[in-house]
Amino acid sequence: MSDGLDAIERLASACLRRLSGPERRELLRSLARDIRQSQSERIAAQRAPDGTPFAPRKARKPEQGGGYTVKFLYPKGVAEPRLVIMKSWVRQGPLLTGFDSEAGAIRSFFWDKIARWLPVDGHERVRGGKLRRRGTIKTKAMFRKLRTARFLKSGATGDEAWVGWTGGAAAIASVHQEGGSDRPAKKSKPVRYARRVLLGISKADQSALSAHIVKQIANKYSFK
């Protein structure tokens, strides 16, 4: 792939020398937009630049759940913990998630922060059925947000075009790009993620970029 990129750089350098400053910036901006779009579409297809599919997510551990009522005070360490009553719930890892009767919605609580478990009264002992949650990120394509225009940016100066992320999005993308480690939550242990190359120039990108450069220059100049 490096040979292809070198050829594009040589072609671009030769072409850009024929353009004025504003024309160069406009060409580079259009190249950056094209690259950003191709990267976004490839990430949506869950494929690396070489065409191989992204490594799948690790299988989730089975959830521990119950359709019976639980009752507890939360959180520990405060003067007046609030009463929580759940009629259906699941436990996964450090979290207990269920339908919070007082809140009238699904809420999550840290298992180790429960101050005290309380006995359930007879009139409260009602089976709530299996907790039905909306589809989670685990069932959807990876990097859905990272590939959007809000996070995946493009731009150009008078000398170069660029595509990438900034801030927190860049840190997240870098972990996956390199196959590094990160904490999925503040209190969780570091997890090593599979390497998934998010940014990279494919052979199709090389051909499209070369064609784009030649077309733009041919509209203005003829080569001798």
Image: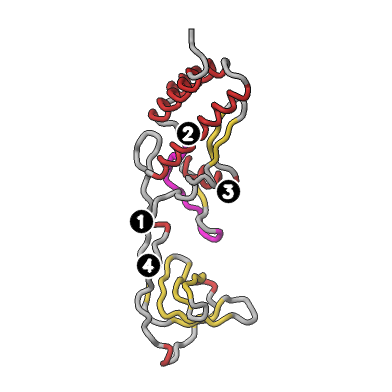
Q: Nearer the viewer, residue 75 or 35?
A: 35
Circle 4 is placed at which residue position? 63
Circle 2 is placed at which residue position? 34
Above or below, comparing residue 76 to residue 139 in the picture: below
Residue 119, image x, y percentages: 46, 87
Label 1: element kind: loop
The residues bearing labels 2 and 3 have C-alpha atoms spaced at a distance of 24 Å
Circle 3 is placed at which residue position? 168
Please name the colour scheme applied to the rendered image. secondary structure
**Amino acid type, mark 1:** Ala
**Amino acid type, mark 3:** Gly
Above or below, comparing residue 210 to residue 174 in the picture: above
What range is drawn magenta here?
A: 186-199
Tell me the residue at 55%/44% (across/down). 170
Residue 100, image x, y percentages: 48, 77
Contact between marks 4 and 1 (CB within 8 A): the answer is no
Disc number lying in front (2 or 3): 2
Q: Is residue 193 magenta?
A: yes
Q: In the image, which disc is placed on residue 59? A: 1
Of label 4 and label 2, which has the lower sequence position? 2
Residue 162, image x, y percentages: 55, 33
Of label 2 and label 3, which has the lower sequence position? 2
Residue 147, image x, y percentages: 47, 45
Of label 1 and label 2, which has the lower sequence position? 2
Query: Residue 40 is drawn in which quadrant?
Result: top left
Tell me the residue at 37%/45% (across/down). 55
The residues bearing labels 4 and 2 have C-alpha atoms spaced at a distance of 43 Å
Of label 3 and label 1, which has the lower sequence position? 1
Q: Is residue 5 magenta?
A: no
Q: Nearer the viewer, residue 224 or 7?
A: 224
Q: Is residue 165 left or right of residue 138?
A: right
Q: In the image, which disc is placed on residue 173? A: none
